[in-house]
Image: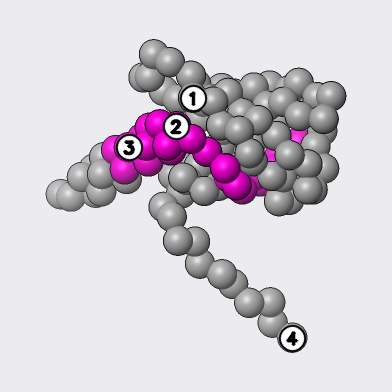
């Protein structure tokens, strides 16, 4: 039987930025590979497990202040790469991430115009 594919409701953009992730006696560092308002793909230096709850401190490119995101859950793990779903985020952090994602989407759209 074919596996059904669920489309994402939020734009996911490629990015390369530094983050700390903390949870359950763990402090790791890594790189955000892509992100949306609701999801993240991370390459990290410390192992995580599916279902683990984490807090993130993310340093987006060209932004002077880190964004703290509490309430993310590990959805999948493959070696040192893992996917996170945002369960809870304060409005200020959500707005900053949303603006960042929109700016990346707009700049990639405009670069495709000949």
**Can you name the residue that lies furthest to the left here?**
114
SS for callout 3: helix
Residue denoted by label 3: 99
Which label's residue is closer to the chain start, 3 or 4? 4
What percent of the width, then of the height, locates residue 80? Answer: 76, 36
Residue at 26%, 44% in the rendered image = 106
The reply to whether callout 3 and callout 2 are in contact (CB within 8 Å) is no
**Residue at which label 2 appears:** 93
User: Who comes first in sequence, dot 2 or dot 1?
Assistant: 1
Residue bearing the label numbered 4: 1
- Mark closer to the chain start, 1 or 3: 1
Asked if the residue at tag 1 contacts the one at tag 2, i.e. Cβ–Cβ closer than 8 Å, the answer is: yes
Residue wearing tag 1: 67
Pointer 4 or 1: first along the chain = 4
The magenta stretch is 80-103
Distance between the Cα atoms at labels 4 and 2? 40 Å
Which is more toward the observer, 114 or 54? 54
Q: Residues within 10 Å of mark 4 (few under 14, many from 20)?
A: few
Dot 2: few (<14), some (14–19), or many (≥20) neighbours within 10 Å?
A: some
The alpha-carbon separation of the residues under discs 1 and 3 comes to 13 Å
């Amino acid at each position: 039987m074919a596996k059904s594919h669920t489309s994402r409701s939020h734009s996911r953009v490629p990015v390369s930025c530094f983050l700390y992730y903390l949870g359950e006696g763990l402090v790791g560092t890594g790189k955000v590979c892509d992100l949306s308002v609701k999801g993240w793909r991370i390459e990290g230096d410390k192992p995580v497990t599916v279902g683990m709850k984490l807090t993130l401190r993310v340093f987006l490119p060209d932004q002077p202040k880190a964004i703290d995101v509490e309430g993310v859950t590990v959805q999948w793990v493959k070696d040192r790469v893992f996917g996170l779903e945002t369960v809870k985020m304060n409005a200020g952090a959500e707005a900053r991430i949303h603006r960042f994602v929109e700016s990346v989407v707009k700049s990639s759209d405009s670069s495709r115009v000949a």
